[in-house]
Amino acid sequence: MNTPATGHGTLAERILRGVGGAENVESLTHCATRLRFQLHDGAKADATALDALDGVMATVPQSGDRLQIVIGGAVARVYSEIMDLPSMTNGGTAPRKSDADVKAEARARSRGRYLWLDNFFEYLSDSFRPLMGVLLGSSLIIAIASVLDALGIVDFRAADKSATWVFVDAMWRSVLYFLPVFVAYNAAKKLKIDPWVGATVMAAVMTPNFTGLINSKIPGVTTTTNETLGTTESVAHVFGLPMQLNDYGGQVFVPLLMVALLALVYKGLQRVFPESVHMVFVPFFSMLIMIPVTAFLIGPLGIWAGNGLGEGLSWLNDNAPLVFAIMIPLLYPFLVPLGLHWPLNALMLQNINTLGYDFIQGPMGAWNFACFGATAGVLLLSVRHREKEMRQTATGALAAGLFGGISEPSLYGIHLRFKRIYPRMLVGCLVGGVLVGVLGGVDTGAFAFTSLLTIPVFDPMPVYAIAITASFFTAMALVYFSDFRTPQDRARANAERDAADAAAQETASADDRELVTVGAPTSAAAGPATVPAAPAPAPGPAEVATAGQGVELAAPVAGRVVDLDEVGDPVFASRALGEGVGIEPADGRVVAPVDGELMVVADTGHAFGIRTPEGVEVLIHVGIDTVQMQGEGFDVRAEAGRQVRTGDLLVEVDLDAVRAADHPTVTLMTVPNTAELASVEPHTGQDVAAGAPVVTVRR
């Protein structure tokens, strides 16, 4: 059984328990919204329990024992709290493995169906992800400059700009121009080699010495022009060999290809040289080998690959602009949750570097704003239906989207949890894409996160504004008017809300009554309460109230409450196991119906016994004759001997498996010590949510 993530402790402690403890953590990193765990054994992670934690938007298990936990904007804080835990002093400890374990692990990894694909996209992701902050910063700088240009304060596109605006250009161009060095550093770090060697190799072909050869008049240098992209390519003979001379500023494919080969060379040299001289000879020979290989082979190959992809997309955009404008926003909703959008981000940067503009980000904006519009629809519904938790989630996600251009909080916090949202959001994507295509397309000269703040960087701005506005309000309206919950889920959610409101109101009323009683002056109507020694022939007011108090037993599962006579089991119908109710379950989540000690947990997961502090015994029995299933379809989430509170998850049941085994799914809750109590009052004939009161017990 997996270690439960729920219970006491901070969110960081509960997450660490949910992934199997510090001893199961091989490494931990984070990005803008997600914790990224590399675990020793992914099977030890309890994804369901982690999903149930407040503060966790979603969990994304991956092959290779990887696990992503989506936190949202607080991810950096949660990461720091986890790393500061005493058990994580060394970042998690690796358990010693036997030779057999190592061999078995290697065989398991080689059999992974998609491990190579996961590794590829992890490589792309980790090479770009740390740069998102500075890329966003540069996009906002150019957005401000574009606003000033639109207002006529400065001609941002003039060829003879003042030194001030040339300097402003340098502020945002610095990120794009030196992007290959940054990517090389991150990629080398990802592949566990010296990141400074990766950065150095890339920087060597970006020095003024190298770039000065381009278009120079030096004998032997020839220049050709790419008519499609409008770029020039120079070739020189170095050591008697032809070398293509390119400006590698802003390139992303070159460093990615170079570091992949550098890692093989670097690790090979580490095996050749003794460890005592690694610092001297491994970087030296790595540079001696890889700088020429990059300049002669990898650099031109990366340019060719990037230009080829750019030309292909450019051809599609030029010849079928409507198809292209529709394709991009409809692809992104499926690429982003899987982390497969990184290649398109690389192509955007490639286009900006080679063409001077990008034509992908404009249609992409239709997807982002459809995503944010769907979140706005959820927010309006949560306000209308007084759903506090969903209102808070949607508010944070919408703010992150509209002002930061970040879609993950919306995707993982809301959209992927409710199946009705995606089809409606896709309609918004389609509407925006059609408008971009019909109105002639949208370009941008900067890598921009598509938010409200970066609208000015898109050209033509009115077309872009119309498209994203249509995407936003289409998705918002569809979600709002058709709801993100099914009618059944809406009824259940509203019932849970009403029950919680009623409980809160009852508690407040009780507190008010208590305050009035305590503060009231003694009067003759109060009887002899002021004389404790005086005998009373009848119980006083306080005693009557105590005698009338009851213990409410909540529904352990959502569904229709029926009388025990209707459950189809003669033992329960005879009340041999006490008075109670049956519930025809709407789902398989079975929770504790009352606070108390969990006295019994059946090995098969079909039955639980709880004793309350007042001495009330409660039996929860899932299905009829389900003991015969030997635990198949029952995922137990609790242990005998622990204290539980109302609503704590006891077991998750695959109701389809129960039905397939020809067993009734009715869940029974009875009070075995009914005879010792004043009364046990079932409340049947109603549809309830889990946690709603269904039995009143009086002592």
Image (spheres, rainbow, N blue to C red):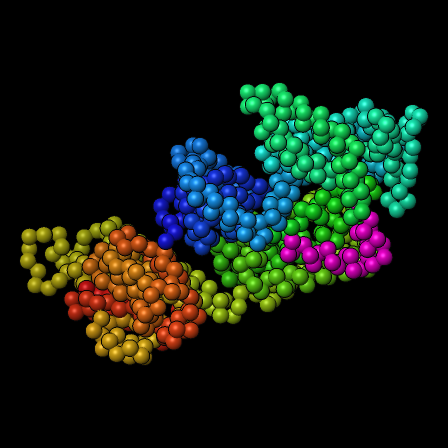
What residue do we see at 81% from left, 24% from top?
Answer: 208
On the question of residue 357 being in view, the answer is no
Residue 694 in the image: state x and y as whole percent: 32, 68
Residue 134 in the image: state x and y as whole percent: 67, 35
Compared with residue 160, is residue 585 higher up or lower down, i.e. above or below?
Answer: below
Residue 495 in the image: state x and y as whole percent: 43, 66
328 is within the stretch colored magenta: yes
Compared with residue 480, is residue 452 higher up or lower down, i.e. above or below?
Answer: above
Compared with residue 526, is residue 121 higher up or lower down, i.e. above or below?
Answer: above
On the question of residue 605 being in view, the answer is yes
Quadrant position of residue 132: top right
What residue do we see at 25% from left, 64% from top?
Answer: 618
313 is within the stretch colored magenta: yes
Is residue 699 toward the left or the right of residue 566 in the image?
left
Residue 393 in the image: state x and y as whole percent: 53, 52
Identify which residue, 437 or 568, lies in the foreground. Answer: 568
Compared with residue 258, is residue 309 higher up or lower down, i.e. above or below?
Answer: below
Which secondary structure dominates the residues rendered in magenta? helix
Identify which residue, 485 or 590, lies in the foreground. Answer: 590
Identify which residue, 5 or 78, lies in the foreground. Answer: 5
Q: Quadrant of the C terminus?
A: bottom left
